């Protein structure tokens, strides 16, 4: 991987986070570590427009995310409205 991006030139989110507003602690160190990961690994993000946590799907596989309500590592209930299923993050999308 090249700094700030992948070998194919696409940007890499590794080292960045998308967290809920405020300073609420995350449930466990394993979950916290995955909030910094690349989407080619297992990455969790909080999407404020959907008010929930998501496992991110790489853009190469269609993008978006799968909503989760509980931590896959420790089982704790996650903050948010408790959505389930696949969503698409359209925040950067512009209709033509």
Image: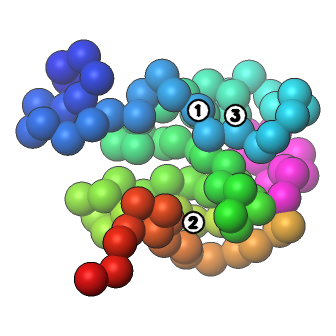
Q: What stretch is highlighted in magenta?
A: 68-80
Q: Which residue lies furthest to the top in this view?
A: 3
Front tag of 2 and 1: 1
Q: How crowded is mark 1: few (under 14 residues within 10 Å), some or many (20 or more)?
A: some
Front tag of 3 and 1: 1
Sequence order check, earlier mark of 3 and 2? 3
Q: What element carries label 1?
A: loop
Q: Name the mark on residue 66.
A: 2
Position of residue 89 measured from the top left corner of the image (x, y, whole percent): 49, 65
Q: In this view, does 85 lie above or below 44?
A: below
Sequence order check, earlier mark of 3 and 1? 1
Q: In the rendered image, which quarter contains the C terminus?
A: bottom left
Lateral position of residue 92 relative to residue 8, left or right: right
Q: Main secondary structure of the magenta part?
A: loop
Which residue is labeled 1 in the image? 17
Q: Is mark 2 on a helix, strand or loop?
A: strand
Between the residue at mark 2 and the residue at mark 1, the CA separation in whole angstroms equals 17 Å
Q: In the rendered image, which quarter contains the N terminus?
A: top left
Quarter of the view holding residue 24: top right
Lateral position of residue 17 relative to residue 73, left or right: left
Which residue is labeled 3 in the image? 31
Between the residue at mark 3 and the residue at mark 2, the CA separation in whole angstroms equals 15 Å
Q: How crowded is mark 2: few (under 14 residues within 10 Å), some or many (20 or more)?
A: some
Lateral position of residue 30 relative to residue 7, left or right: right
Sequence order check, earlier mark of 2 and 1? 1
Q: Residue at x 32, y 34 (%)?
A: 12
Q: Residue at x 49, y 42 (%)?
A: 42
Quarter of the view holding residue 38: top left
Asked if residue 73 lies in the magenta stretch, the reply is yes
Position of residue 83 measured from the top left corner of the image (x, y, whole percent): 76, 73
């Amino acid at each position: 991987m090249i700094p700030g991006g992948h070998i194919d030139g696409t940007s890499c989110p590794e080292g960045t986070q998308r967290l809920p507003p405020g300073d609420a602690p995350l449930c466990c160190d394993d979950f916290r570590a995955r909030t910094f990961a690349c989407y080619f690994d297992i990455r969790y993000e909080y999407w404020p427009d959907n008010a929930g946590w998501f496992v991110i799907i790489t853009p190469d596989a269609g993008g978006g995310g799968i909503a989760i309500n509980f931590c896959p590592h420790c089982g704790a209930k996650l903050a948010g409205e408790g959505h389930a299923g696949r969503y698409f993050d359209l925040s950067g999308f512009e209709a033509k």
